[in-house]
Image: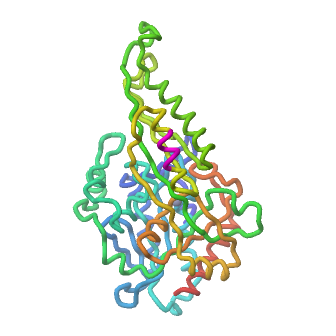
């Protein structure tokens, strides 16, 4: 399975993956998911948001079921493991199990548009499923080429008119367990290859529209310029300083410059701020202080409050797997489902460098196999 996925959406220059929602590449990945499910005799259904669900048995008859899974899309130049490891491990765990012994239906989920790389809202598929993302807002979101999510869904063969909270699908999920490569170094020091998630930090994304006046880079005197790139420089430094003051993290990782010419003073710079931390008030304070330096009110594109996973389930899995419990600053579909009241847990597989959202993201084969083994044990215990 890993070899089949290795080349899909990979940029030969950077070695990173560009697997964006509702593109042709995304279509290939979704087809791969359907093929793997079909090989195992699983029935695949798409929900209203376009998330795919592969079931061992009718979830309406014997459910609600236990669902494993993750996502297949990536950030720009992302790594191979973030997302796909959870889905490949779920199929591999199923292959190790005696299916006749399952006491309830087992599902494997492939969430659509987890990274939000194309339309700017992370976990769009699970947010639409649970109703926390407004369908009209989602349909109108645009990518960098001006294509709306509705248009992209239509091109990919999914009906955008169908999106919205999906009660039928939610009823089928008794428990959700997402395995994910660790995005940090919590497991590096210890001896355990697999950990159990404690909670997800509150986190969000904000857009800063910095306006100036386009002009000639050669003939305009410095004193006469209104250059938003200078504001941007201050904004980036303030994001770092404010994060240090408040004990959070903050990142400016995406920009849009108009007109984006070497010899033109920009008329407009749009910057996106990602801020996260253990305490929501600290995160809010960072955003406010960055906004003050920017001279504009940051436009909130998404916000996810602190998400604690089901404590009983967390403790049960930590004991079952003899695994350490870890917090994380990364958002996941599992967090969205947990916030919607579904008993949810996450397993993390050790990442020797801690690096993620980069081609350098890695996990050793032995640790990945330990993750598969852990998932299989979880299924035996819960289903
Ligand atoms: Zn992920």
Camera-nearest residue between 160 and 312: 312
Residue 271 in magenta stretch: no
Q: Which quarter of the rendered picture does the N terminus lie within?
A: bottom right
Give left or right: position of 31 versus 372.
left
Image coordinates of residue 66 in percent, x first then y, are 48, 81
Total of numbered circles in the picture? 0
Please tell me whether residue 57 is drawn above or below residue 264 in the rendered image: below
Q: Residue at x 45, y 78 (%)?
A: 107
> In screen coordinates, is 304 left or right of 321?
left
- Image quadrant in which you'd find residue 50: bottom left
* Residue 268 at x, y percent in the picture: 38, 28
Residue at (30, 41) in percent of width and height: 146
Residue 357 drawn at (x, y percent): 56, 50
Q: Nearer the viewer, residue 24 or 104?
A: 104
Q: Quadrant of residue 171?
A: bottom left
How far across and how far down the image is residue 314, in percent?
59, 76
Which residue is depicted at the point 30% across and 55% down?
A: 138
Drawn side of residue 125 relative to residue 281, left or right:
left
Image vertical order of residue 7 relative to residue 127, above or below:
above
Way the structure is coloured: rainbow
Q: Is residue 324 positioned above or below 102 on the image?
A: above
Q: Is residue 172 above or below residue 274?
A: below
Q: Is residue 210 among the parts visible in the rendering?
A: yes
**Which one is nearer the viewer's eye here, 285 or 106?**
285
Asked if one can make out residue 155 in the rendered structure from this viewpoint, the answer is no
Q: Which stretch did the figure color magenta?
A: 284-289
Among all residues in the image, which is located at the extreme left? Answer: 161
**Helix, strand or loop: magenta stretch:** helix
């Amino acid at each position: 399975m890993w070899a089949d996925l290795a080349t899909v959406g990979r940029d030969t220059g950077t070695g990173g993956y560009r697997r964006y929602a509702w593109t042709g590449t995304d279509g290939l990945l979704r087809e791969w998911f359907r093929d793997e499910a079909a090989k195992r005799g699983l029935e695949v259904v798409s929900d209203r948001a376009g998330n795919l669900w592969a079931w061992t048995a009718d979830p309406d008859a014997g459910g609600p079921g236990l669902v494993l899974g993750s996502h297949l899309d990536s950030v720009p130049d992302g790594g191979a493991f973030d997302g796909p490891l959870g889905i490949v491990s779920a199929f591999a765990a199923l292959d190790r199990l005696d299916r006749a012994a399952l006491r309830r239906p087992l599902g494997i989920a492939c969430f659509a548009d987890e990274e939000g790389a194309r339309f700017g809202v992370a976990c769009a598929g699970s947010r639409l499923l649970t109703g926390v993302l407004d369908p009209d807002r989602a349909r109108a979101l645009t990518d960098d080429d001006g294509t709306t999510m509705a248009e992209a869904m239509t091109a990919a063969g999914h009906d955008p008119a169908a999106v919205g909270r999906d009660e039928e699908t939610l009823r089928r999920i008794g428990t959700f367990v997402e395995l994910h490569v660790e995005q940090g170094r919590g497991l590096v020091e210890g001896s355990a290859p697999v950990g159990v998630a404690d909670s997800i930090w509150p986190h969000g994304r904000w857009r800063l529209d910095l306006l100036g006046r386009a002009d000639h880079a050669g003939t305009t005197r410095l004193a006469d310029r209104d250059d938003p790139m200078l504001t941007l420089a201050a904004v980036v430094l303030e994001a770092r300083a404010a994060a240090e003051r408040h004990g959070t993290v903050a990142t400016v990782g995406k920009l849009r410059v108009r007109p984006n010419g070497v010899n033109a003073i920009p008329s407009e710079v749009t910057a996106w701020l990602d801020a996260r931390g253990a305490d929501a008030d600290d995160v809010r304070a960072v955003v406010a202080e960055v906004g003050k330096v920017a001279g504009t009110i940051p436009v909130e594109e998404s916000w996810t409050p602190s998400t604690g996973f089901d404590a009983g389930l967390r403790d049960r899995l930590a004991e079952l797997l003899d695994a350490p419990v870890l917090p994380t600053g990364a958002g996941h579909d599992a967090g969205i489902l947990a916030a919607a009241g579904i008993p949810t847990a996450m397993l993390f597989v050790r990442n020797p460098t801690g690096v993620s959202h980069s081609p350098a993201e890695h996990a050793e084969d032995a640790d990945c196999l330990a993750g598969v083994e852990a998932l299989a044990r979880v299924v035996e215990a819960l289903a």
